[in-house]
Image (tube, rainbow, N blue to C red):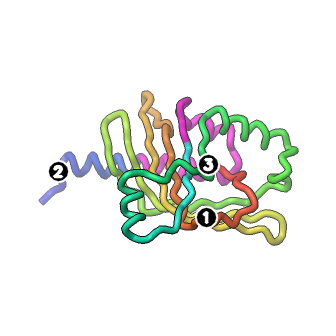
Amino acid sequence: MPPSEAAIAALLLRAEIEEWLLAEADLLDARRFREWLGLLHPEIRVAMPIARSLSPALLEREERTQAGRDVMWVDEGYRTLEQRVRQIETGIHWAEEPASRVTRIISGLRILEATPERVLAGCRFVLHRNRLEDETDLLIGRRRDTLWREGECWRLHRREVLLDQSVLHAKNLTMFL
């Protein structure tokens, strides 16, 4: 039986969003931060709540109600992200001189909700950062990205980053998540 038009449309949307996320990762890994800002919606919010070590019952309740997500490693809007880019562009950003080498791997993309103008996508990620001779960080987790369509383009409106660690071992969070 041939796939339905709805199934084909869903596959095409998934491929479009996957290509967007991979292109975004390429821009960030190549330190093309000014171009990356062009992918963001002016009302963007990037949030990374601190993971808490809880019993399975409390963890399930917290995930269901979003409780406990008011303490953040990261909680930024467009203005803060743009200021961070400007600071890095000065060439005198102490935590990024010399520059970090970063690679992001995006995997397990799923379209969780979709309308013609809005997509909620979930994925897994691995972010590896190396700086100097011996500074290495590995961040692993999940993301929930909300993208809004503006004409022919998608813009990132919200990103929630859920790390799989409750203690952050990185010396700083200068990389964009």
Q: Is residue 62 magenta?
A: no
Where disc 1 sits, the SS reads strand
Distance, label 1 to label 2, CA atoms, is: 39 Å
* Residue depicted at x 68% and y 42%: 33
Q: Is residue 128 above or below residue 156?
A: below
The residue identified by callout 3 is 74
Looking at the image, is mark 1 or mark 2 earlier in the sequence? 2
Left or right of residue 23: residue 173:
right
Q: Which dot marks residue 139?
A: 1
1 vs 2, front mark? 1
What is the three-letter code of the residue carrying label 3? Answer: Val
The span picked out in magenta is: 17-45
Structural crowding at the residue carrying mark 3, measured as other residues with C-alpha within 10 Å and reported as few (<14), some (14–19) or many (≥20): some
Structural crowding at the residue carrying mark 2, measured as other residues with C-alpha within 10 Å and reported as few (<14), some (14–19) or many (≥20): few
Residue 85 found in image quarter: top right
Residue 110 found in image quarter: bottom left
2 vs 3, front mark? 3
Where disc 3 sits, the SS reads strand
Q: Is residue 78 above or below residue 93?
A: above
What is the three-letter code of the residue carrying label 1? Answer: Leu
3 vs 1, front mark? 3
Q: Magenta region's main secondary structure?
A: helix
Looking at the image, is mark 2 or mark 3 earlier in the sequence? 2
* Residue depicted at x 54% and y 61%: 51
Q: Nearer the viewer, residue 103 or 3?
A: 103
* Residue depicted at x 56% and y 65%: 140
The residue identified by callout 2 is 4
Q: Position of residue 69 (x, y in %)?
A: 50, 51
Q: Position of residue 160 (x, y in %)?
A: 50, 49
Where's the N terminus, which quadrant? bottom left
